[in-house]
């Protein structure tokens, strides 16, 4: 009954002990304690009474803060992933002349403006990763961004997946659910350009999967101080099977996502068609997301099937290698990032991670009465607390009996969460 009237049940999953921090006042506190204190109760609009209604409402309620951006196109440094990607930096004021080739309220930096962007200041900086076929213009992303930055003192930028947000694809290399290479280059550039800024990151849906994979690949070398992933699909193969085995999952969600990806494909088909592995007619005749992935992602990356791609690109195992304080937020009624795909047991083995689940919320929705978004408030409170109240350099690791921490050696079996079938040039 509590969920029926909009008061969602909340659960927190984490190990018996999580990593320790010191507050700026010198008091020791566990990561799980920080999370539980800052996450607000989840009271949603009672008229949006289940995950389907919450999710569908995202297509209706388009009200969001009017964020302004300046864009810079980066050329990939890694020769294995040639091409370019676009990063949108949040700015205070709108451009004098709108650029109709870009999303609303977005224009390019001039070379002179970008030349002077570097700074020695210590402002916290947030990196955002959007969902499938989205971009910096997405409503859900701007809600979260506003909650983090509304009190001032923050800087932020959004990395757009190649071809998204009206960016150009300049090679045969597209983005996929393991597309961590552009994130890695951007974070490296941010560290060099703003050496004193603590870096934070948040990912949404597919961007959450990519961010988790990135943090797992970086492990102890990560320079991200804390991160949040919202509506992460976690196990893409499981999510795909669940979607295919329900009428709404197949004919609404998978079909809509497939249509969105086909639309993205058509914007860039002449460039993508240069890849001899891709059958253009097969892509155009696809209906559902898994068919698009079968005809695009599989051939592009050498996977024999979409299932092989989904299993290899999932972030559920990568979670075990994350050594960055990570808050994950999932709604168990999410019809896209489904409950069956959430790695509940894995969260019990990583002291750097806390999972917060709500019984209501849908996919990147969590609409409260009045149109505000609960997840955005949770993200804002978490990052503000970590940046303002916590000594981020005081994190103390916790040893675990999990094989990720305890290597037997002497030829005994060992588990490596980041051992992948497809080898990428990191």
Image (cartoon, grey):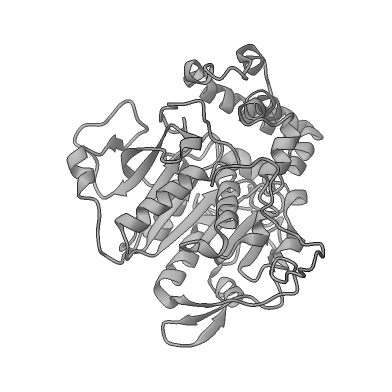
- Residue drawn at 58 percent across, 22 percent down: 262
Question: Residue at the location (41% across, 82% down)?
Answer: 24
Q: Is residue 103 left or right of residue 184?
A: left
Q: Is residue 201 above or below residue 19?
A: above
Instruction: Let me know if residue 63 appears in the view.
Output: no
Count numbered badges in the picture: 0
Give the vertical position of 142 relative to 272 (above or below): below
In terms of image quadrants, where is residue 44? bottom right
Near-viewer residue (42 or 380): 380
As drawn, 113 above or below 217: above
* Horizontal arrangement in the rendering, residue 109 relative to residue 40 (left or right): left
The residue sitting at the front extreme is 410
- The residue closer to the viewer here, 28 or 81, is 81
The answer to whether any part of residue 391 appears in the image is yes
Report x, y in % for residue 372.
Answer: 49, 53
- Tell me which residue sits at (61%, 58%) in the image: 329
Q: What x and y, as percent, mark residue 246? A: 80, 35
Which residue does the image show at 74% across and 29% down from the upper left? 305
């Amino acid at each position: 009954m509590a969920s029926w009237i909009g008061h969602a049940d909340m659960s927190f999953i984490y190990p018996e002990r999580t990593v320790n921090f010191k507050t700026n006042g010198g008091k020791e506190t566990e990561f799980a304690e920080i999370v539980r204190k800052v996450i607000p109760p989840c009271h949603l609009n009672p008229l949006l009474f289940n995950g389907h209604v919450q999710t569908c409402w995202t297509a209706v309620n388009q009200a969001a803060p009017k964020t302004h951006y300046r864009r810079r196109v980066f050329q990939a440094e890694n020769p294995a992933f040639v091409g370019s990607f676009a990063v949108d930096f949040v700015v205070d004021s709108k451009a004098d002349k709108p650029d109709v080739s870009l999303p609303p309220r977005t224009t390019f930096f001039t070379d002179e403006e970008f030349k002077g962007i570097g700074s020695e200041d210590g402002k916290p900086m947030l990196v955002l990763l959007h969902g499938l076929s989205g971009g910096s213009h997405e409503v859900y992303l701007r809600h979260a961004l506003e909650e983090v930055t509304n009190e001032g003192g923050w800087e932020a930028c959004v990395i757009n997946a190649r071809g998204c947000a009206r960016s150009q694809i300049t090679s045969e290399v597209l983005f996929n659910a393991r597309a961590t290479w552009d994130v890695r280059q951007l974070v490296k550039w941010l560290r060099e350009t703003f050496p004193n800024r603590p870096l934070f990151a948040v990912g949404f849906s597919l961007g959450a999967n990519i961010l988790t994979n990135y943090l797992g690949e970086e492990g102890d070398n990560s320079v991200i101080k804390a991160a949040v992933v919202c509506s992460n699909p976690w196990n893409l193969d499981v999510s795909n099977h669940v979607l295919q085995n329900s009428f709404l999952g197949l004919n609404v969600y998978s079909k809509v996502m497939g249509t969105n990806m086909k639309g993205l494909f058509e914007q860039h088909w002449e460039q993508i068609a240069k890849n001899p592995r891709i059958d253009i007619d097969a892509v155009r005749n696809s209906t559902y997301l898994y068919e698009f992935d079968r005809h695009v992602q599989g051939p592009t990356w050498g996977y024999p099937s979409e299932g092989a791609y989904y299993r290899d690109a999932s972030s559920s195992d990568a979670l075990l290698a994350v050594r960055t304080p990570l808050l994950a937020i999932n709604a168990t009624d999410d019809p896209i990032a489904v409950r069956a795909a959430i790695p509940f047991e894995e969260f019990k083995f990583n002291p750097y991670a806390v999972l917060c689940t709500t019984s209501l919320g849908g996919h990147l929705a969590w609409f409260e009465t009045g149109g505000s978004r609960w997840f955005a408030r949770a993200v804002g409170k978490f990052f503000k607390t970590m940046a303002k109240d916590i000594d981020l350099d005081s994190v103390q690791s916790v040893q675990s009996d999990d094989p990720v921490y305890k290597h037997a050696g002497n030829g005994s079996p060992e588990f490596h969460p980041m051992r992948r079938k497809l080898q990428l040039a990191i």
